[in-house]
Amino acid sequence: MPPRGRTAAPACSADRALLSTPADQPDGLLGPAAIRELAQQLELRPTKSLGQNFLHDANTIRRIVRTADLRPDDVVLEVGPGLGSLTLGLLPAAARVVAVEIDPRLAARLPVTVAERTPHLSDRLTVVEADALRLTRLPGPPPTALVANLPYNVAVPVLLTLLELFPTLDRALILVQAEVAERLAAAPGTDAYGVPSVKAAWYGEVRRAGSVGRRVFWPEPNVDSGLVGLVRRPPPPGDRAATFAVIDAAFATRRKGLRAALARWAGSPAAAEARLLAAGIDPTTRGEQLSVTDFARLAATDPVAP
Ligand code: SAM
């Protein structure tokens, strides 16, 4: 049940509002009682628009951290730390965690929670209050791994934006809606294959990394979740923006053959056909059959005069 009730304790105060919940987990992780108490202190009403579903199961946190396979020198970028469930699990496993949170109350409270529960790791944490989609830079050394329980409605743009912005990110492990996990990791020719699959594949090798049920979240979402891992690899040759433009065009009219679907992109159906043939692609093929390497090759063909 969502916590109700209000406490007199003001939110986000370092010297007050200490958690009375005993450390129910030996490693300081947050269980359901601690999440409930924190939410009460902050008078938090989780919002759907910010995808605020907080993990309250320490075993799930341990599993995510294990799956992330962090190195002791990793600088982890966590988007949406929320009440700190995952942050507390990441801190012992990495050199630094940079946590980017859009909600000012949560951003202000996070250092307090970490100081209360794992004071010896406090200096590894940097909290940035910001919209992850509008970041331009981060303080400190560049991030090497993205590990996050992402806000579901912006999960794909956040992933793609951060992979573009921080080339030093060589791995990602994200928790997203099960359907999005399936789309991100889908192979060409499958029903789930689409724009997110191809664009993610431009950056790296993507794999499903396990399922997560609804009951480990507060509030419980009405969908299941899945972990997705990405390991960066050199991108296919050619320009990223040009490749992404042809991907968008090909999937905008998914059911059409590429000659028709790419007519606007190329200037005319005949120009689309010429460029497809130049890239060695049958013009009757549909976009969902092409790999990211095919799209990159197609984007690199010379424009044809109308
Ligand atoms: N990591 C926490 C956990 O696992 O319990 C919370 C995850 S919750 C699914 C998503 C978090 O992302 C929330 O704390 C929300 O406020 C934050 N958030 C939503 N949109 C954001 C954005 N554009 N940039 C940064 N944080 C965002």
Image: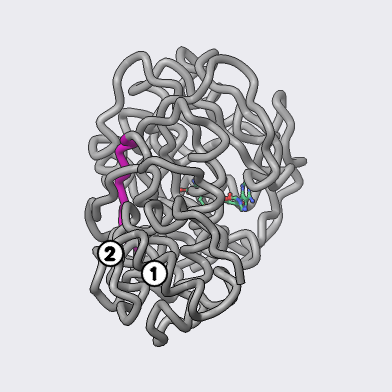
Q: Position of residue 181 (x, y in %)?
A: 34, 61
Contact between marks 1 and 2 (CB within 8 A): the answer is yes
Q: Position of residue 21 (x, y in %)?
A: 48, 39
**Residue depicted at 50% across the width and 59% down the height:** 53
**Residue depicted at 50% across the width and 37% down the height:** 78
Residue 186 sits inside the magenta stretch: no
Secondary structure under the numbered disc 1 in the rendered image:
loop
Q: How many marks?
A: 2
Magenta stretch bounds: 224-233
Secondary structure under the numbered disc 2 in the rendered image:
loop
- The mark found on residue 165 in the picture is none
Q: Position of residue 2 (x, y in %)?
A: 54, 65
Position above or below: 251 against 78: below
Classify residue 182 as left or right of residue 166: left
Q: Is mark 2 within 8 Å of ligand 1?
A: no
**Residue depicted at 24% across the width and 63% down the height:** 187
- The mark found on residue 194 in the picture is 1
**Residue depicted at 41% across the width and 39% down the height:** 147
- The mark found on residue 186 in the picture is 2
Classify residue 134 as left or right of residue 177: right
Q: Which quarter of the rendered picture does the C terminus lie within? A: bottom right
Q: Residue reaching furthest front?
A: 305
Residue 8 visible in the picture: yes
Instruction: Determine crowd level at label 1: few under 14, some 14-19, many 20+ residues with C-alpha closer than 10 A.
Output: many
In the image, 174 versus 216, the foreground residue is: 174
